[in-house]
Image: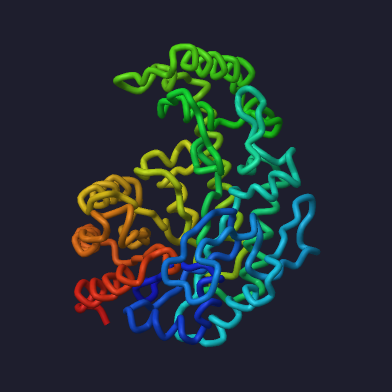
Amino acid sequence: MNSAAYRSLYVYAWDIADVGVTQFIDEALSMGITDVSVATAYHAGKFIRPHAKQPPRVIFPEDGVTYFKPDLARYADLQPQAHSDEKLLNVIPALLADGRLRVHGWTVLQHNTRMGTAYPNATVKNAFGDSYVYSLCPMQNAVFDYALQLCVDLTTQHPLHSLILETPGWLPYAHGYHHEFAQINTSPDVEILLGLCFCDACTTAAKEKHIAIDALQQRVQSAIQSAFDQECVTPAKRSDFFTDADLLAFVSLRQDRVTELVRAIRQAIPATCALAVIPTVQRPTSACWTEGSHLHDLAQVADYLEIPFYEKTAQAAINDAIECLAHVPSPHKIRAILRPGLPDLDQGKELAAAIKGLRQQGIRDFAFYNYGLLPQSQLTHLANTLTQEFSDVT
């Protein structure tokens, strides 16, 4: 889809409600922002709001709820739940009614502890059969259908400029679950193995593809336990386990499933609504395969890949983009997300260098994270940088 360049600000509904929709839009426009990417379905958290006008300063959002009113008749086994505050449900309609910013729906799919608690059979099961309550498994038809209907429901009710999917696949083992704690080192290889799902749906799908999944599950168990017994001494290079033919076939199966889901969503939502996919919640982007993302395939079925280049330096962000572009047919397929302050880009000092370097790679679309989490000084810095770096763009 061709359109004017994307200059978006990621934001939560409660931070817009804090100042009011009109004032938020006025502020965003004064910063050089043209779009808003607002959370429409989101997970739990604990967030500091440094420039909040009203309490709370530290917010614990309702877990796994939507910020629009779902049409529950659309859903089968898994039922979404709207936020309890009517004021927050009115934010998206008010943004659309104002019309001065293009509105995008930032929609978290499989990361949902509320849903996992309510529907434990829908969650990821590791090689030992342990359920990850925060992670729904998209191989399960009920989860696939829930994610599809959530996207159709949202975009049918609200004429969004685009839908942005986060966690369409499997979450990595380490993703900040509350009180996440261990007294043993876990190497990246072990965490990848701990993130694999062996629920009934995954094992059935694997057997249909003639993958020896039961034997693979035993090998994964043994590899994890061996690492635990050795206190996870991190190898100098990737373990030979990752050349295992069954494991590689299983990874491919998972990637095909995520691509299938994204394709189904693209076909089902209105043609007027673009579809963007955040392929990973890890850094760098090359780790996305562990979540079921295949950059080339996703770029074929979605309109955009919305990639968080969350790095400590501008050069690291640029290097990640160069690696991504090797798998994507055009830089115009990529929308870059940057954090213009802590913990990235030398506390935001290298924001201009990151934007400049990414633009030199042909990337034209940018979003910035997150309005309510950044201190006012960083929002001012972002505004000044946008003026400086996009003076050539009308």
Residue occupying image coordinates x 64% and y 18%: 214
Mark yes or no: residue 263 visible. no
Q: Quadrant of the N terminus?
A: bottom left
Looking at the image, residue 149 sits to the left or right of residue 222; the answer is: right
**Picture layout, residue 8 above or below residue 326:** below
Looking at the image, residue 365 sits to the left or right of residue 83; the answer is: left
Mark yes or no: residue 118 visible. yes
Looking at the image, residue 363 sits to the left or right of residue 337; the answer is: left
Q: Tell me where residue 223 appears, x and y as whole percent.
A: 50, 16
Describe the colour scheme in one phrase: rainbow
Q: Quadrant of the C terminus?
A: bottom left
Q: Tell me where residue 321 appears, x and y as whole percent.
A: 29, 51
Residue occupying image coordinates x 42% and y 67%: 50
Residue occupying image coordinates x 24% and y 59%: 358
Q: Depth check: 95 or 214 in front?
A: 95
Q: Depth check: 111 or 275 in front?
A: 111
Residue occupying image coordinates x 34% and y 66%: 366
Q: Which quadrant would residue 129 be assigned to in this image? A: top right
Q: Which quadrant would residue 236 be assigned to in this image? A: top left
Q: Tell me where residue 142 appears, x and y as whole percent.
A: 73, 46
Q: Tell me where residue 293 appears, x and y as whole percent.
A: 47, 43
Q: How many marks?
A: 0
**Picture layout, residue 229 above or below residue 190:** above
Q: Depth check: 236 or 14 in front?
A: 14
